[in-house]
Amino acid sequence: MPQKRLTVVVTRRLPEVVETRLSELFNVKLRTDDLAMTRAELTAAMAEADVLVPTLTDQIDAGLIAQAGPRLKLIANYGAGVDHIDVETARARGIMVSNTPGVMTDDTADMVMGLMLAVMRRMQEGLATMQEGNWAGWAPTAFLGTRLGGKRLGILGMGRIGQAVARRASAFGMQIHYHNRRRLRDETEEALEATYWESLDQMVARMDVVSVNCPHTPSTFHLLNARRLRLMKPSAVLVNTSRGEVIDESALTRMLKAGELGGAGLDVYQHKIKGNPDLVNMPNVVMLPHMGSATLEGRIEMGEKVIINVKTFADGHRPPDQVVPAML
């Protein structure tokens, strides 16, 4: 007698090839639109699913997990970050959580470099001038930015993405510095030609550019608070492609408005959807709508990881990308 197929509920639209493969393997309930599920819809989904496939737009907190049906045994997150899921409560309820690490490393690192270039070379100002039809012709002193070569880059979080940023920035001639929860192995540090700073305060005070590449956890919430931001050089640039909660966005906004920072390149925001409206029209701030991992190749690979995690679970084994509280 064939084994009953798992019921898998997917909370957002995924690339067509991913949805098709999921449908071939499981009893899948897909979204017909690309809007985030309401809390009521999430509650209903968790009541009927064996496996839930959420994204970062779904807040899976203790209250929702408490209402999960007895069948729900795996939350196979579509994405690497799991700060929107109460992993500890899920584990206590016997629900495993998996994610999709390592897939978006190169795409996000590319975006870090793109934001650096956009801010430091004033691309947004140049683009706006052209779009508004206000270009009066080339001038020796127009749109003067700063070059990347020779600048000190401080990477906050030297995991996969941080190291990928380091390799790219090194090719631009930047000097690599980093602060991490744990120091890298000697051979990795030497290969990256990276200088380790045990003190985050001391690092940020000396950098020309700071790139945030650490996850959002309770210990990293507002890690770059008002006090630390004030340590940065007035000419320094801050780039964040990780999570908005790592930076005190209100303090950052005040400093940018006051001319106390050189600029910022932001792909994520503390207030998820629109970010701080005061940042929108600043000429030295480049804001993107969380595009760091937005490549077709990357999103398909994320889906493939979800499929592997769910299929492995369906076969009675631990998902290869299981997340446990001790990892956070």
Image (cartoon, grey):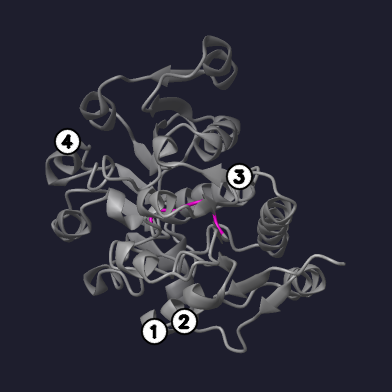
Residue 71, by quadrant, is: bottom right
Q: Of marks 4 and 3, which one's residue comes earlier in the chain?
A: 4
- Of helix, strand and loop, which one carries label 4? helix
Label 2 sits on what residue type?
Ala
Question: For the residues carrying marks 2 and 3, which lies nearer the camera in this image?
Answer: 2
Question: In this picture, which residue range is highlighted in magenta?
Answer: 79-83
Picture quarter with the C terminus? top left
Residue 231, which numbered label? 4
Q: Residue 252: give its label.
A: none
Local SS, label 3: loop
Give the residue drawn at x 56%, y 51%.
99
Query: Label 3 neighbourhood size at 10 Å, few (<14), some (14-19), many (20+)?
Result: some
Separation of marks 1 and 3 at Cα, in angstroms? 28 Å
Kindly identify the amino acid type of the residue bearing the numbered disc 4. Leu
Q: Check disc 1 and report the residue beneath it.
A: 40
| Residue at horizontal 44 percent and vertical 60 percent from the top | 139
- Kindly tell me whether residue 221 is visible in this rendering: yes
Task: Write down the residue under mark 2.
Answer: 44
Front-most of residues 30 and 314: 314
How far apart are labels 4 and 1 at the CA level? Answer: 44 Å
Mark 2 and mark 1 in contact? Answer it, CB < 8 Å. Answer: yes
Q: Earlier in the sequence, mark 4 or mark 1?
A: 1
Q: Verify CB contact (< 8 Å) between mark 4 and mark 1.
A: no
Q: Is residue 317 above or below residue 257?
A: above
> Closer to the N terminus: mark 4 or mark 2?
2
- Classify 10 Å Cα crowding around label 1: few (below 14), some (14-19), many (20 and above): few
- Of tags 4 and 3, which is closer to the observer? 3
* Residue placed furthest toward the right: 1
